[in-house]
Image (cartoon, grey):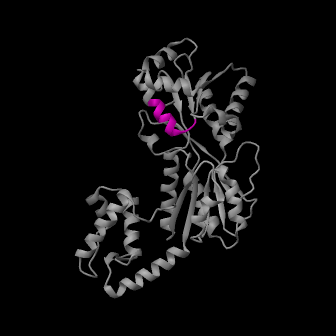
Amino acid sequence: MPTNLNGRSTKHGELTQKLLDLAQTLEPGGRFPSQAELMRQFQVSDRTVLRSLHDLQRDGWIVRRHGSGTFVADPSERQVEMATTRVATESRTVAALALTFVPSRFYQHCLDLLSAHVEEAGLSLVCHHAPNQASYADALPLAALNPRGFIVFNYALLPIARRLMEQDHRVVMVGVPPAGVHPEIPIIYSNHEQGGYMATRHLLDLGHRRLLYSRIDLSLLPQTLRWRGHLRALREAERAGLHTNNALLEVERLTAWRNDPDLVAAYFRQPDAPTAIVVWNDSEAISLLTILHRAGLRIPEDVSVIGYDALPEGEESLPPLTTVDQHLDTQLHMALDLLAQPVTPSPSQSIVIVPTLVQRASCAAPRSF
C-alpha cells in the first residue's frame, strides 16, 4: 500500500492526534500555536509538524491565513475548508515510487527534500516502496489517485515508468542510468562519472597512490558511471607517470572488520596498505569511520576517507566527511518543475547536474608524501 506522507502514522500520527485534541479545547477563531512553538513543545521535527498541520487543515479543524498565522476554524468554516482542501489534494498530488533496496538513509534524505519542495508548492506527496522485482501492478495504487505526475527513483523501474507514460501519466526519473545506457524517459541525474573521477582525483592530488575502494555490493560496480570515473582518474595518473594501486574492499573483509578491530589495525599496519579509501556513499563512509576509530586509526592522519552524496550526517561525523555533492535538492526541484510545465516532458529530455567536491576534514596528504 502507498504511504501517504500527509497521512497519519508513528510519530506523525501521534502528533496529529495531540494537535486535534488541542484544537478541540480552543475557541473557534482562536490562534493556534505556531510551527516553531509546536516543535519546541512536542520535541519533533519541522517536517512532522508541517505534516500534522496539513492533516488538521485538510480535515477542517484549522485555517492557515497567509501573513497572519494559523487559527482554529469556525464550525461554518470547517465544511468549506474540508471541501476546498480535499479537492486541492486530489488534484495536486505528486506520486513517488522507489525500490525497497534503495539505501534507506539516502532515500529518506531524498524524501525529506522532496517533501519540502512539495509543501512549498502547496501540493501533497504520496510514496510507494516497490519490491525488488517490481511490476506495473506495484504502481496501480498510486495511479488510481490520478496524481499530477510520478517521480521515479532508480533506473531499474524503467519498465514501470514506460507503462505509466503509455497510460498518459507524466513521469520524471531521478536517478543515474547504467553506464552505456541511453535514457528513454524524462530524466534528471548528476554526472556520476565526473563525480567518481572528482573523488579519486582529489585523493591523487593530495599524494595518495594506494587506494581502497569500498562498496557493499561490488558485483554492480562495473556497470556504474561512478566506477568508470574512478578508473579514468587512475588511468590519467598512470599516463602522468604515477604508479597507483587500486584494491577493492570485499564485503567478507568488511564484515570481519566489524567484528574484530584487531584485523583492521593489522591490515593498515602493512607497509603497502592503502592510505585512502574511496567509499560508495556517505552512509557507508560514516559506518566505516566508526570501524576505523574502533581499531585505533586516526582520520585522516593514518588513512583518508571520502564519501559521496553530501548527506547532512557527513557534516557531523568525526571528522567531518569529505564528499561529493550531487545536488539532490536541485534535481528534485527540477523534477517538480518538469511535472508542472504546460507541455508533457519529452521522453528524450535529460538534465544532467554537475557535481561538486565538498572538502572537509577526513582527507589529507599521506604521511609519506
Question: Is the magenta region chiefly helix, strand or loop?
Answer: helix
Give the residue displayed 36% in from the left and 83% down from the top: 78
Residue at the far bottom: name it.
76
Q: Nearer the viewer, residue 82 or 281?
A: 82
- Using the rendered image of the protein, determine whether residue 298 is visible from the camera's viewpoint: no
Check the image and report above or below for 312 versus 344.
above
Q: Position of residue 313 (x, y in %)?
A: 44, 42
Q: Is residue 333 left or right of residue 258?
A: right
Give the magenta range. 280-289
Residue 269 in percent (x, y) is at: 50, 13
Q: Is residue 267 left or right of residue 189?
A: left
Q: Is residue 225 left or right of residue 268?
A: right
Q: Quadrant of residue 206?
A: top right
Q: Is residue 146 magenta?
A: no
Q: Residue furthest top?
A: 271
Residue at 64% x, 65% y: name it.
338
Compared to 199, does 67 lie above or below? below
Q: Which image quarter: residue 144?
A: bottom right
Residue 226 in view of the camera? yes
Q: Which quarter of the picture shows residue 240?
A: top right
Count numbered badges in the picture. Answer: 0
Which residue is nearer to you in this view: 229 or 114? Answer: 114
* Residue 286 falls inside the magenta stretch: yes
Residue 218 lies, in percent from the top left, at 62, 32
Task: List x then y, in percent, for residue 66.
Answer: 40, 76
Taking the spot 25% from the left edge, 70% from the top edge, the residue there is 22
Q: Quadrant of the C terminus?
A: top right
